[in-house]
Amino acid sequence: MDRPIIGIPMGDPAGIGPEIVVKALNREEVYKISKPIVIGDRDVISNAMKFCGLDLNINVVESPQKGKYIKGTIDLIDLNNIDIDELEIGKIQAIAGKAAFEYIEETVKLALEKKIDAIATTPINKESLKAANIPYIGHTEILEGLTNTSNPLTMFQVDNLRVFFLSRHVSLRQACDLVTEERVYDYIKRSKEALEVLGIRDGKIAVAGLNPHSGEHGLFGDEEVKEIEPAIRRAQEEGIDVVGPVPADSVFYFALKGAYDAVLSLYHDQGHIATKMVDFERTVSITNNLPFLRTSVDHGTAFDIAGTGRASEVSMVEAIKVAAKYAFNFNKQNKA
């Protein structure tokens, strides 16, 4: 089986990113399905192995095509951008924010040059980015800026449950205001297109309700009647297999059981809570509409346990697995 090359930017060097990377790359299952290459700093990776009690070889290469991709060896593009004596594990620092951005920047460059098949990202810290004067608040915004992509579409996957999001990091009040007919209609279409790129043809999409019991025909709010239902009808008239609004207290359960291929969540926490309650560690984020496939762990830098070797690598392993699962189909569709 041909294995896709998965680029892994190391993340904030003061956080748990380096630790979950070395732990994940100590798993045989990762190498059976992918060729993982780390973009980071050799000294930080060496330190992470000490924290985790691992003794792996580090193979520094200039390009992904030079990697060995065998268990027991970490293939690394070394940016050599951290003075290990200045790095304070578990703390917000400008040097760490700057380095984390540079790892992402180099990984994106490799993806755009088609030298890697997909990206699986690790945690970065918003405050460290700010301390380094990086003009982005997080991963998605960085990827938007580096690729000149407008409004990428986020999807979470855990087991059989796939969830798209109508809005991301905005207040709940603003999120409710964003539930308009035009926006819901647009996101239904974008969700269908994203499923197709991932290889899911004729996928059935359910739109979650916004209000309790989807508003009970206007008794508990009229957004369903005025905005959501008209959007769904428009999409149905175009031949899209979409239903709803389905009450949010049941739609995610039914999707997990196979009734729907994906759910359109109407705001950030609605879908985050649903997926993370299924399996917090195995929930993976996928960013659609970029020129390349990007998956990510769905947790932060965990400064409180960084440097202890206690961080779980499960989410990192899952992010690599999902990237490997969809990479070839994604790239095939993007060439079309």
Image: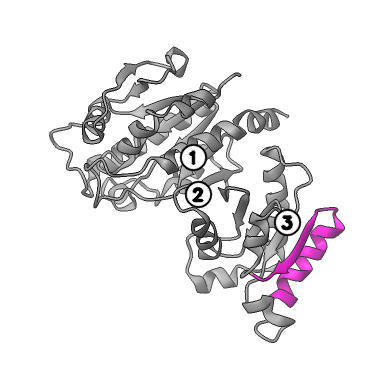
Q: Amino acid at mark 3?
A: Ala
- Against 127, is 265 above or below? below
Q: Amino acid at mark 2?
A: Thr
Nearest to N terminus: mark 3 or mark 1:
3
Magenta-drawn segment: 223-247
The residue beneath circle 2 is 283
Q: CA distance from mark 2 to mark 1?
A: 8 Å
Viewer-side residue, 140 vs 15: 15
Residue 78 appears at what percent x and percent y?
Answer: 31, 23
Viewer-side residue, 222 vs 108: 222
Quadrant of res 43: top left
Q: CA distance from mark 3 to mark 2?
A: 19 Å
Which residue shows up at 47% across the image and 29% down it?
A: 30
Q: Which image quarter is the C terminus in? A: top right
Q: Amino acid at mark 1?
A: Glu
Q: Which image quarter is the N terminus in? A: top right
| Cβ atoms under marks 3 and 2 closer than 8 Å | no
Q: Is residue 234 magenta?
A: yes
Residue 191 appears at what percent x and percent y?
Answer: 68, 51
| Cβ atoms under marks 2 and 1 closer than 8 Å | yes
Q: Is residue 70 in view from this perspective?
A: yes
Which disc number belongs to residue 259?
A: 3
> How many other residues sit within 10 Å of disc 1, few (<14), some (14-19) or many (≥20)?
many
Q: Is residue 116 in view from this perspective?
A: no
Nearest to N terminus: mark 3 or mark 2:
3
